[in-house]
Amino acid sequence: MKIIHCADLHLDSNMTSNLSREQAKQRKAELLATFERMIAYAKDNSVKAVIIAGDLYDKKNISANARNVFLSAINNNPDITFYYLRGNHDAESLFIDCDTIPDNIKMFNDSWTSYKIEAPEDNSVITINGVELTADNSNVIYNSLVLDSNNYNIVTLHGQEAMSSSKDKTEVISLKELKNKAIDYLALGHIHSYKMEQLDSRGVYCYPGCLEGRGFDECGEHGFVLLDIKDNKLVGNEFISVSYRNLYEEDVDISECMNSVEMAEKVREVLYNKDYASASLIKVVLTGQIDINAEKNLTYITENFKNDYYYFKLYDHTSIKVDYSSYQYDKSLKGEFVRLVESDDTLDDITKASIIKIGIDALSGEEFI
């Protein structure tokens, strides 16, 4: 039996981080389309169940478009059962306009709910168990979880993993308390990047991540996890990348560069070696110590790349390197200025270098940006 594990879809997210209004509108539509593409994959690959481990939506008030996309996916795929566990962002109003809730969507609440799937074709008995974490149940859910070790047991929760207890338990999942509970696969949501690790000698735990990255804190590929279970054993698990666009952040050391042309070439070398698709969103952070006499124009560097990608942003985290010995005997106004700033004990080295850079640019007739 094939099962999809996804989480943190955040349908209806505004997608406004870093983007123009038109780009945000497009990304919002792409997020819905990515969800539909995942469902199409499920249909084409004979997936029998889709587990949504929280945060299907991004906010309590959801648009009609986002609601209809999800409900249409359920109604148009009666052979797929959807197991939907609500997260901290999810809305209570999902089914408010529905005469009846579709038979192929199964929900969870604040006490353990278990669904059994029997697959006689491969002798599997699979249980999908879940509970929505609250401030009231966080202390009791672990002791009340009872599983039959003869079954293949999937447990789904939404929250932050932790090996020790926490004061705020509403969204914290104690992995320690879930060990040796006959869990085969712990289907989690809340963390927006893919992660799969061993839970104990029997089972694993997994965060599939979100379907589309929304900001540069969600870089890399995004998608869902496909499970294949036969004879009550996990015979295959695969991360399936499905996102329209990916976000990437690259640090570029420009310490040896003396002008903007060289800096742009250094950025180009790093990006082109990675061969990022033109649909990508790229953040480049300039790093290193550059010479006080180096010419650096961020607008010029940005212009070299802004049309190569869907979105390109340049950040300058460089510091300035001053060779004070070269100005020790310089009798020019520039030399006097450098020595004056260097001798000021009230300034730290970073501030001195910044002041000297501004002063030298001014004395040289350069416009400070």
Image (tube, rainbow, N blue to C red):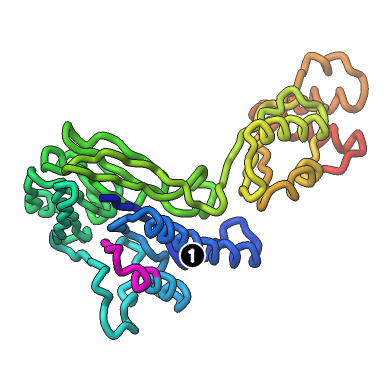
Magenta residues (range)? 73-83
5 up-or-down from 335: above or below: below
Residue 96 visible here: yes
Q: What element carries label 1?
A: helix
Q: Can residue 347 be seen in this view?
A: no
Residue in the picture at 18% in, 47% down:
122
Q: Mark 1 points at which residue?
A: 32
Which one is nearer the viewer's eye here, 191 or 277?
A: 277
Q: Where is residue 169 in the image (x, y as percent from the top left)?
A: 22, 52
* Residue 83 in which image quadrant: bottom left
Residue 149 position within the rendered picture, expressed as x and y whole percent measured from the top left: 8, 43
Where's residue 116, x and y in %?
14, 58
Q: Residues within 10 Å of mark 1 (few under 14, many from 20)?
A: many
User: Left or right: where does residue 143 sit relative to residue 365?
Assistant: left
In magenta segment, residue 200: no
Q: In this view, does 128 lie to the left or right of 209?
A: left
Residue 198 vertical placement versus 103 (above, below):
above
Which residue is farthest front?
121
Q: In terms of depth relative to the viewer, which is nearer, 1 or 166?
A: 1
Would residue 79 be counted in the magenta stretch? yes
Q: Is residue 45 above or below residue 15?
A: above
Residue 275 at what x, y percent from top left?
Answer: 64, 36
User: Who's the residue at 57% across and 61% down the image?
Assistant: 27
Q: Which of 323 and 122 is in front in this view?
A: 122
Q: In which quarter of the image is the C terminus?
A: top right
Q: What residue type is labelled 1?
A: Leu
